[in-house]
Image (cartoon, helix red, strand yellow):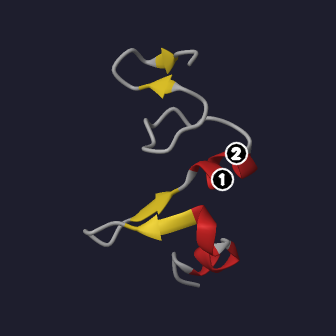
């Protein structure tokens, strides 16, 4: 089983490929997952600020 087969279960509006070919998860995906991974994701709906190392309320 290759590493990309798990992505076949994603809905089209839960991710997109950026100009470098990387998968970028959307806010919908993060909300569906249900928690913040604290990696500073581009579309993090939880308000995690990687520079401060904590969730910052919006």
Q: Is residue 22 left or right of residue 7?
A: left
Q: Are marks 1 and 2 in contact (CB under 8 Å)?
A: yes
Residue farthest to the left, as pictured: 20
Q: Position of residue 54 (x, y in %)?
A: 50, 17
Q: Residues within 10 Å of mark 2 (few under 14, many from 20)?
A: some
Which of 1/40 is in front? 40
Q: Residue at x 58, y 15 (%)?
A: 57
At 33% from the left and 20% from the top, the residue drawn is 51
How would you rate the neighbour count of disc 1 (Cα within 10 Å): few for under 14, some for 14-19, many for 20 or more? some
Q: Which mark is residue 50?
A: none
Report the number of discs: 2
| Quadrant in the rendering for residue 21 | bottom left
Q: Residue furthest front?
A: 58
Say which residue appears at 52% left-offset and 82% top-offset: 2
From the image, tell me which residue sits under label 2: 31
Vertical arrangement, residue 48 with respect to residue 2, above or below? above
Q: Is residue 57 above or below residue 1?
A: above
In the picture shown, does residue 38 fall above or below 7?
above
Q: Which mark is residue 28?
A: 1
Q: Is residue 42 left or right of residue 33?
A: left
Image location of residue 30, percent across then percent down: 63, 47
Q: Quadrant of residue 1?
A: bottom right
């Amino acid at each position: 089983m290759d590493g990309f087969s798990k992505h076949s279960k994603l809905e089209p509006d839960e991710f997109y490929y950026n100009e470098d070919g990387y998968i970028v998860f959307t806010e919908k995906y993060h909300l569906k997952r249900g928690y913040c991974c604290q990696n500073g994701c581009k579309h993090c709906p939880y308000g995690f600020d990687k520079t401060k190392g904590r969730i910052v309320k919006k």
